[in-house]
Amino acid sequence: MNYIWESIAILFTGFCLLRIAGKKTVAQMSGLEVITILAIASTTGHAISETGLLKTILTFCALITLLILIQFLSIKFYIINKIFVGNATPVIQDGKVISKNLKKLRISLDQLEARLRENGISSVADVKSASIEITGQLGYELMKHAKPVTLGELEQTLNQLQSSIVQQLVNQPHVFKELVHEHQTNNNPTH
């Protein structure tokens, strides 16, 4: 019966500490965060049979404290951020693939093209810049000609087109205006 209460306490403590650690999906986690979560999972698995409740809770607290400390320091100091979190790696610049960075990342050109297609991009030439983010996701900016039109841009274009048409109509001579003008200038006899 004691094991059941210890299991509940470990589960509750782990849940609370993970909430303190922050809300991220596995795809958004850095390597350090993934390792911390795996360490907590491993500790939880061994906690009931091998170690006492207090040791398990203290281990959880130490892991989360270390994680939060490194996250805080990585915000303050670039070098710690670079060591523990990492930086995005550019893979495309001005429509050209940066092959040496693909080799560093151990990503083939086919894999890069697959990631582009997953994001609705059919050609490398349409990409102004792209990088593999620290989460492993592809971040990109499209060339001007390949960017989708926003609602604001469409409204602006339609307003300009409408103004242009109205201006042309105002400047265009009207048939009735000419007839009235001719009638006034010509002294046509009235019949």
Image (spheres, helix red, strand yellow):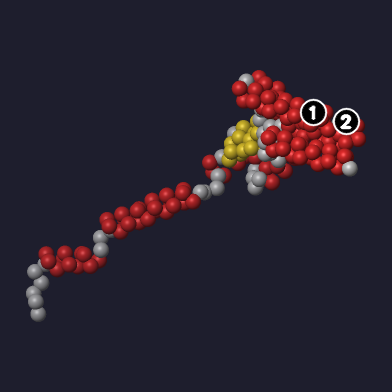
Give the structural element (helix, strand or loop) at label 1.
Answer: helix
Q: Residue at x 68, y 28 (%)?
A: 68
Residue 142 sits in which quadrant? Answer: top right
* Residue extending farthest bottom: 191
Q: Residue at x 35, y 53 (%)?
A: 164
Residue 137 visible, this orientation: no
Vertical position of residue 91 compared to residue 114: above or below: above
- Residue 178, image x and y in percent? 20, 64
* Residue extending farthest right: 49
Residue 108 sits in which quadrant? Answer: top right
Badge 1, how many Cα within 10 Å: few under 14, some, many 20+? Answer: some
Vertical position of residue 70 compared to residue 180: above or below: above
Task: Write down the residue under mark 2.
Answer: 51
Report the Cα–Cα distance between label 1 and label 2: 10 Å
Q: Residue at x 68, y 35 (%)?
A: 20
CB contact under 8 Å: marks 1 and 2: yes
Q: Amino acid at mark 2?
A: Thr
- Residue 3, image x and y in percent? 88, 40
Residue 155 visible, this orientation: yes
Task: Write down the residue under mark 1.
Answer: 59
